[in-house]
Amino acid sequence: MIYKERMDPFSYLSVLTSTVLALGIARLLTGGGKLLQARRRLRLYWVHLLWAFNVFLYLVLTWWILFRWRCQGQWTFFLFLLLSPIVGFLLAVLLFPDSLEDGADLREHFFWSRRSFSVLGALLAPIDAIDTLLKGWHHFLSQGPLYVATLLLVFVLNVVAASRAAKVSTPSLQFSSSSSSWPSSASTCES
């Protein structure tokens, strides 16, 4: 029997984006499991844990919301369909060191990777804005003013957090983490 059913473009591309998102989720879950195993031998840091949870939510929400692209007939914006998952994956990698040795200090690790983490976090806002604009100007406007304000706030706070001043960047990262799991949510499909 010859199987002649073709895979539609959304299904084909969603395999790759879902794989990248799944790798990020796996990295976070593996890091969380390592933390549980070594919790007595590590110095935990609550901002690090908050960001791990936030990035996990971001990856899951991105996966869920990417499903709404299924009704798009034109796939000339593949780069933006994959860019956000790649950045999310890199954020997950930066959160957890490859090895958690006895006495590891997650606060120290977090501040060591803070600049790279914040720069990547800042990229998510323009990527999401472009992604939303590619769905159409009407779709972008339907997100409302809170969407634009959130994008600007997350971008600015991540840029501030990338600065060298730890006293300035810590509150920025803390506040930014509470407002950045936002991939655009209005559906592009009627069904």
Image (cartoon, rainbow, N blue to C red):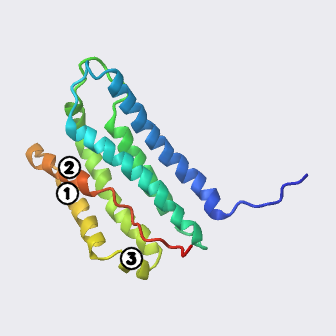
Disc 1 to disc 2: CB gap under 8 Å? yes
Real-space CA distance between mark 2 and mark 3, rounded to the nearest whole angstrom: 26 Å
22 or 126, nearer to the observer: 22
Task: Give the side of residue 143 with respect to residue 75, left or right.
Answer: left
Residue 39 location, x and y as percent? 28, 23
| Secondary structure found at label 1 | helix
Residue 41 location, x and y as percent? 26, 18
The type of residue carrying mark 2 is Leu
| Secondary structure found at label 2 | helix
Residues packed near mark 2 inside 10 Å, few (<14), some (14 to 19) or many (20 plus): many
Q: Residue at x 63, y 59 (%)?
A: 11
Task: Give the side of residue 126 with respect to residue 89, left or right.
Answer: left
Residue marked by disc 1: 157
Q: Residue at x 58, y 66 (%)?
A: 70
Task: Give the side of residue 9 with respect to residue 98, left or right.
Answer: right
The outermost residue toward the right is: 1
Disc ID at residue 140: 3
The outermost residue toward the bottom is: 138
Residues packed near mark 3 inside 10 Å, few (<14), some (14 to 19) or many (20 plus): many
The type of residue carrying mark 1 is Leu
Q: Quadrant of residue 182?
A: bottom left
| Secondary structure found at label 3 | helix
The type of residue carrying mark 3 is Phe
